[in-house]
Image (cartoon, grey):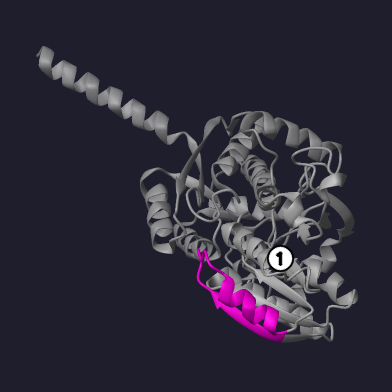
Amino acid sequence: MKAVLLAIALALGAGHALAADAEVLRIGVLNDQSGPYADFGGKTSVVAAKMAVEDFGGQVLGRPVEVIDADHRNKPDVAASIARKWFDTEDVQMITDLTNSAVALAVQDLAKDKDRITIATGPFSSALTNEACSPTGFHWVFDTYAAPRGVATGMIDDGAKKWFILVTDYAFGHAMQADLTTTIEQKGAEVVGAVRAPLGTADFASFLLQAQGSRADAIALANAGTDMINAIKQAGEFGIMTGGQKLAALAMVISDVHALGLQTAQGLVAATSYYWDRDDASREFGKRFDERTGRMPGMVQAGTYSAVLHYLKAVDAAGSTDADQVAEKMRELPVHDFFAPNGTVRKDGRMEHDMYLVEVKKPDESKGEWDVYKVKSTLPASLVTRPLSESQCPLVN
């Protein structure tokens, strides 16, 4: 009899533990933590997500909120397997970051079938809210439409009429190339050549020699992370900038500049959604983040914080974690935080917000390790966001 009672007690205890565990609302941060984009978002994006949860109060609808994370290793099949496990066995309600466009597209499609939310903060492909849009998928920070509109437009106006594009050979690079080409042609400039390099390429010599030989006014780097850093370093070794050609770093983040150093990166122009020293609110978040991580946040980390905070606000407003109800509230509620003081979430899932045109400082202009940008101008949301009239997203029509 004692053995039977003990078994029942253990079963009841396990049942209560499972019930309690089921009450936890889990958010997943799925990104590259060991490859070329590990410093782009990586483990520090997980910290940003946890900061958002803490600032919200640590719970929503009476349920504690937990952040879990994993490394997708830039493989869509690995990412989809992790996401499926999270959805099916760990009751993850939302996945964010998703650095790597091919990964993001795969996970967003899976989440749509599973009635879960995705908020992409790390990938850039505009397909996420264009032809591949999802009723439960959102894109928060930056995309391949914003890059050429924010950077190339200014450079063309300054005289860069001939362009060569160095493209990372997967979904992000292809989308960047397509959107950049459209912008260049609309501005009356010309693409004189393009070349695609595999993700993770270490030696860019042959690609850069083609770009140099094209005699283009500007060489656009449609890559990111370690790939972009290596390309910029090697461009300097070939004397591309000193030879009169300009480099357009279309997907540069602050950690890239930090890795390159101002001596190498000075003069590069980029568009960013966030800079820690832009205003008081940005500085306040930057200081808290630095205390947690030992570095300043880039736009991906800041955007992940904003995305998680907005998601929790939407859950609270919906009174439910049901994906359709939460998605509706995410579109209804304004985004108002240090990252996007006047953001709006559109029908296609794109969070529309201002961006900033920045130039990397010269070494003698910098006052500290992370004092790397001069903010040249504000890029209004209307300039850097694809008009809904041009959208291929079925949700728009």
Residue drawn 65% across the image and 45% down it? 301
Residue 10: horizontal and vertical position, in percent? Answer: 23, 22
Q: Residue furthest top?
A: 2
Residue 143: horizontal and vertical position, in percent? Answer: 68, 64
**Amino acid at circle 1:** Leu
Q: Can the viewer see residue 42 in this picture?
A: yes
Q: Observer-nearest residue: 341 or 332?
A: 341
The C terminus, quarter of image: bottom right
The N terminus, quarter of image: top left
All told, the count of numbered labels is: 1
Residue 283: horizontal and vertical position, in percent? Answer: 80, 36
- Residue 212 painted magenta: yes
In the image, the segment drawn in magenta is 192-214
Residue 313: horizontal and vertical position, in percent? Answer: 67, 41
Residue 185, placed above or below residue 51:
below
Q: Can the viewer see residue 394 in this picture?
A: no
Residue 350, placed above or below residue 69:
below
Mark 1: few, some, or many residues within 10 Å (few <14, many ≥20)? Answer: many
Secondary structure at numbered mark 1: loop
Residue 54, placed above or below residue 110:
above
Residue drawn 71% across the image and 87% down it? 192
Left or right: where does residue 295 sit relative to residue 360? left
- Residue 123 painted magenta: no
Q: Observer-nearest residue: 4 or 183?
A: 183
Residue 172, placed above or below residue 309:
below
Q: Quadrant of residue 218?
A: bottom right
Residue drawn 90% across the image and 74% down it? 158
Residue bearing mark 1: 250
Left or right: where does residue 348 sit relative to residue 379? left
Q: Observer-nearest residue: 53 or 33?
A: 33
